[in-house]
Image (spheres, helix red, strand yellow):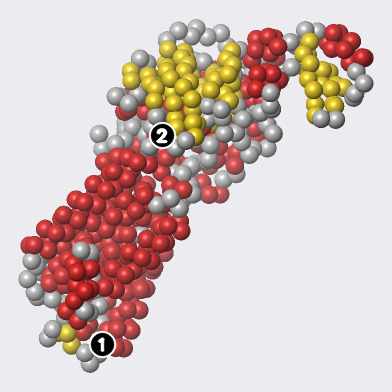
Amino acid sequence: MFNGFTAVLYREFTVYRKRFFKQLLTASLSPLLFLIAFGWGLGREVSVGGMPYINFLIPGLVTMSSLNQSFAISAEINISRFYFHTFDEYLIAPASHLEIVLGEALFGVFRGMLSCLIIFLYVVVFKVKLSFNAMFLPAILLHTFQFSALAVTTSMVVKDHSSQALVNNFVITPMIFLCGTFFPLGKLPSAFNYLVSILPLTYSTKAIRASLTGGTVEYSHLSIMGLFCLVFFITSMLALRRVEA
Amino acid sequence: MYSDGIFPTVNQTAHQSVLQAKGLRKVYGSRVAVDGIGFSFEEGEFIGFLGPNGAGKTTTIKMLTGLVKPTGGEITYFGKDFFANPRFAKRIIGAVPQQNNLDRDLTAYENLKLHAILYGMDRSGMSEKIGEMLTFAGLTNYRDMQVKTFSGGTMRRLVIARALLHEPGILFLDEPTVGLDPQIRRSIWEFIVKVNNLRNTTIILTTHYIEEAERLCRRVLIINDGKIIAEGRPDEMKKEIGQYVLEIYMEEGINERFFESREDAVIALRDSRYPCKVREVTLEDVFLKITGRRINV
């Protein structure tokens, strides 16, 4: 019954294994640059909410990096749909849409989680003191799942590479800069508060930051993240159904 | 036609209807891609959908394999409705799409393994089955090589091998030899005929190559503008319009006249004021006679 699910994961992990070092290197670079530029360069003398800026920044980088890695499956599914047509193999096979979506989304979760490990390595290297709360695990799971499911949705909706890039530029990048990743949300003009309050990354950042900096993880935030998971999961199922129209 | 070719004819006892379609339609916006076609195929048949590019052949195959939802009509496999029993139907069909949609980052073996898992094949005998299929397709030497290094012909072979791995009763091939050089095309033909003869797999292929349809298919459905405009054995269809053609090269284009015998054609040739040529009839003439245009323009 889970043949489609297993097959998707077999494919993704076999390819991932072959590209492991390349992918690891790619995932390591941008958070490192952010750490150097903002953590060391700009933020050395700055403190936010009573903590050194670098402590504030690290959880932001965890959300940013894992979001990027989880969402990256979108471009790859897009290539497999429109360039190599390998995605058709799944659609022709006796496998349900549910299996395909879940397989891809879980691989996205895996990629996102792996990128967190890289940042934790930096934490050790940069000698940053974080307090690790067990609530980090459900938070990062929900966080990576919602953006993996969004990635699957996007890859099913867009028709070519350029629209894929459009989504990256106009949805993902602004979200990364506006949702409290690099600075506390209170600093923004109030009009922005309405905008960021409907963006999923806002809640991920709050929950993940709280779990890594000794704050309390609000259940309401986790619930909203769960809701986004559900919404994006449903949209990806609907979008996949439309692919076969 | 096929009896004088390179391929042996095997006496087959066709009986059960493996695939039936009724009133199959596909409409994209205001464009009708497939306009209410129907057919019934029996086990072991070798069918060809022949028609020009854009006739609706690929859309038909995509509907039959579940890649595209029909606007109307019904499809049944072994008497069971396709859409009510998708898992059953998808397990008994194999599909070779127009593009070589192999995973280029995987080896030949890994591509087949992915397919085996996808089709829920038994884990215990999986590796042996894949080995046997690679041998059957003549790809043993390519087992552990990355697909991105393969030539077009080798990729084609692997795509066909992959589609056969779960032992489907029906194999769909969408333009199987497009873009291949003549020698490779011939080897792919031999491979497909072998599949049909040795495994008794029902084969349904689409093509816009006249020669491909004439050489391989025991039954041809000629498709134009989303409709089946003629159907039958290639030799019988040709016999119906006459055995020989007199091509008359006139200023406004080539005019064609059909004759029962070469002698009649030659007599007509003598009276012509224009340059002429006498040749045997092909399926293209059948198409031309019905539609007034050529398949490959």
Horizontal side of A224 relative to B217 (left or right) equals left
Q: Residue at x 69, y 23 (%)?
A: B292
Q: Is residue B153 above or below residue B291?
A: below
Q: Nearer the viewer, mark 2 or mark 1?
A: 2
Residue B247 in the image, given as x and y percentages of width and height = 82, 21
Provide the chain ID for the residue under circle 2: B
Q: Nearer the viewer, residue B18 or B240?
A: B240
- Where does label 1 land, which residue? A43
Mark 1 neighbour class, 10 Å CA radius: few under 14, some 14 to 19, many 20 or more? some
Q: Which residue is drawn at 56% across and 27% down?
A: B225
**Chain of the residue on which disc 1 is drawn:** A
Residue highlighted by disc 2: B68
Residue B48 visible from this viewpoint: no
Residue B94 x/y as whole percent = 44, 29
Quadrant location of residue B215? top right
Q: Residue furthest bottom?
A: A45
Asked if A164 appears above or below A30 in the picture, the reply is above
Q: Could you classify mark 2 by the number of other residues whose Cα lies within 10 Å: few (under 14), some (14-19), or many (20 or more)? A: some
Q: What residue type is labelled 2?
A: Val
Residue that sits furthest to the front in the current view: B30
Q: Quadrant of residue B252?
A: top right
Q: At 18% across and 67% down in the image, what residue appears?
A: A197
Which structural element holds mark 1? loop
> Circle 2 — which element?
loop
Q: Which mark is residue B276?
A: none
Q: Is residue A54 left or right of residue B257?
A: left
Kind of residue at badge 1: Gly
Left or right of residue B196, residue A225 in this image: left
Quadrant the N terminus of chain A occupies = top left
Position in image of residue B154 (x %, y %): 57, 39
Depicted B124 relative to depicted A154: above or below: above
Q: Residue at x 43, y 23 (%)?
A: B24
